[in-house]
């Protein structure tokens, strides 16, 4: 066995069922829900032991191809940089089109250098506790992928779960350590059906992880979904490099039908492809997997007290049991409650019974319908230059705290509807205001009149913190006319 593995990390999800911690602007894969690293970085780190686990096999593991939403590109890049990690390529989706188009553009990118690696496709927001078992399953999957199959990993169920889709196993494949032909995908069952699946031993949970040669996937998607294949090929061919990122063509990709890997291809297999046939296989995986799809899964990940509570932050418990209690910015007390989820952030509080956490998505849908920002972003919003946090707001004023990383530069811009006052509370700022450029240090301030070009920079080696007071008739973020920007953005 001699080839390369190119991991493909699909990082485009929104994680709406984990609101209010997960938001569109900062989704769950970027959160630290299982330790000190984000779920995305945990996924990257999961690859570290793969080469050692396969010490007798002649293959290498390439840096991952990361497919992410264009909006999250700087967050992903910054997490990689801070962890001293690298990606083979950061592929930007201008709009979400589900996993089949995401994998298709990744396959084109993987073959751009003339290679035809085996793609190991993983979601960026899953947990796997037993990495050795995961690596062993990957080796089994790799042999099957080299044989021309599309391989999925089925999670060995430990309970009659109704929240997952299932995979029905077919006949065993000789010499492949439990691997089977894939007989059928099954939709989420009711509780009685799920119990029968568990007792039969013939069903596995659908993990959403796959292995396939890049060329095999491109042949399969063309055979099963020619519209997706054509749109992605054109979006890739007319895409462009942008610093650390690769942008597929926006119009071509937006015209691509949206579909998942399962529906688009896996449920169509086997299919004829040229003179051959592409079939599917499933490798059982028993490795402490979780998709962390809703708040009860976060409760299961934690270390409970004697009453079954998991608490994070400034939390006090009196007579509560079997509850998840998270506080980000304030004191949270739980008294005499059981089986609840209570999550507090700077701008929102969720209280839900564990049995109804799937309905959290309905709250997010309502927030979007009402045009409320709590459904999209946190009070603290991250930018490539740092972050800003709203401290106060009124009808004609807004107060923010800006944190600018050492060496970072905001865009040269102006506003038509607001003026700004800047007060430096930490570090040194270089300010451009009209034709002037000057330095401000702690406790010094300046005024930016409406309609005047301006820029803020941090020339120092420590974080720059500035209190910004905005005043005017319109205070939203889209009142920006940008003239120069290091990060090639249309909007901050």
Image: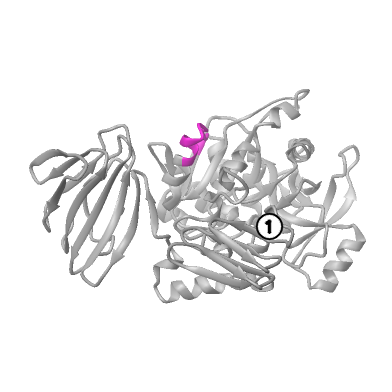
259 or 336: nearer the eye? 336
443 or 235: nearer the eye? 443
Q: Measuring from the top left, give residue 413's x and y in whole percent.
A: 20, 50
Which image quarter holds the N terminus? top right
Residue at image point 86% right, 64% down: 197
Residue at image point 76% right, 25% down: 57
260 or 216: nearer the eye? 260
Residue at image point 76% right, 36% down: 132
Looking at the rendered structure, the secondary structure element under dot 1 is helix
The magenta stretch spans which residues? 79-89
Residue 178, located in which quarter of the rendered image? Answer: top right
Magenta-colored stretch includes residue 383: no
Q: Measuring from the top left, give residue 249's x and y in whole percent.
A: 42, 49
Q: In the visual, does 377 lie left or right of 336?
A: left
Q: In the visual, does 332 lie left or right of 395?
A: right
Q: How is the image coloured?
A: one colour
Query: To which residue does mark 1 refer?
Result: 262
Q: Measuring from the top left, give residue 207's x and y in whole percent.
A: 71, 53
Q: Is residue 238 above or below residue 308?
A: above
Magenta-colored stretch includes residue 88: yes
């Amino acid at each position: 066995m001699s080839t390369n593995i190119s991991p493909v990390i699909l990082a485009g999800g929104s994680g709406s069922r984990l609101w209010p911690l997960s938001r569109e602007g900062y989704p769950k894969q970027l959160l630290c829900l299982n330790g000190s690293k984000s779920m995305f970085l945990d996924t990257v780190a999961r690859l570290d032991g793969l080469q050692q686990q396969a010490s007798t096999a002649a293959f290498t593991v390439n840096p991952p191809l990361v497919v992410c939403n264009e909006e999250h590109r700087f967050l992903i890049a910054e997490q990689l940089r801070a962890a001293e990690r690298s990606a083979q390529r950061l592929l930007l989706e201008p709009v979400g089109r589900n996993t089949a188009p995401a994998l298709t553009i990744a396959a084109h990118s993987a073959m751009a250098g003339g290679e035809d690696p085996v793609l190991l496709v993983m979601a960026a927001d899953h947990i796997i506790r037993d990495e050795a078992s995961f690596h062993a399953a990957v080796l089994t999957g790799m042999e099957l992928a080299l044989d021309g199959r599309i391989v999925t990993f089925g999670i060995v169920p430990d309970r009659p779960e109704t929240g997952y889709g299932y995979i029905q196993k077919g006949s065993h494949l000789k010499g492949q350590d439990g691997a089977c032909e894939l007989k059928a995908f099954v939709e989420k069952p009711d509780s009685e059906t799920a119990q029968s699946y568990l007792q039969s031993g013939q069903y596995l949970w659908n993990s959403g992880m796959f292995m396939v040669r890049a060329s095999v996937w491109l042949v399969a998607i063309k055979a099963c979904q020619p519209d997706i294949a054509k749109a992605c090929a054109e979006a890739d061919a007319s895409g462009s490099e942008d610093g650390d990122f690769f942008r597929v063509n926006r119009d071509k990709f937006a015209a691509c039908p949206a579909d998942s890997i399962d529906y688009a291809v896996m449920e169509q297999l086997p299919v004829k492809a040229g003179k051959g046939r592409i079939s599917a296989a499933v490798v059982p995986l028993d490795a402490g997997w979780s998709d962390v799809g809703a708040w009860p899964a976060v409760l299961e990940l934690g270390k409970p007290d004697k009453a079954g509570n998991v608490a994070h932050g400034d939390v006090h418990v009196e007579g509560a049991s079997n509850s998840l209690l998270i506080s980000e910015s304030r004191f949270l007390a739980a008294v005499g409650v059981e089986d609840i989820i209570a999550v507090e952030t700077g701008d929102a509080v969720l209280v839900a019974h564990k049995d109804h956490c799937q309905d959290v998505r309905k709250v997010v849908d309502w927030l979007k319908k009402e045009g409320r920002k709590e459904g999209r972003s946190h009070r603290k919003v991250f930018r490539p230059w740092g972050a800003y946090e709203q401290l106060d707001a009124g009808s004609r004023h807004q107060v923010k705290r800006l944190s600018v990383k050492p060496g970072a530069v905001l865009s040269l811009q102006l506003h038509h509807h607001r003026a700004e006052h800047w007060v430096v509370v930490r570090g040194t700022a270089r300010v451009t205001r009209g034709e002037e450029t000057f330095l401000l240090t702690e406790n010094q301030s300046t005024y930016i009149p409406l309609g005047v070009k301006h820029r803020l920079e941090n020339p120092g080696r420590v974080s720059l913190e500035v209190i910004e007071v905005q005043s005017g008739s319109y205070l939203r973020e889209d009142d920006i006319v940008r003239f120069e920007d290091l990060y090639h953005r249309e909007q901050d």
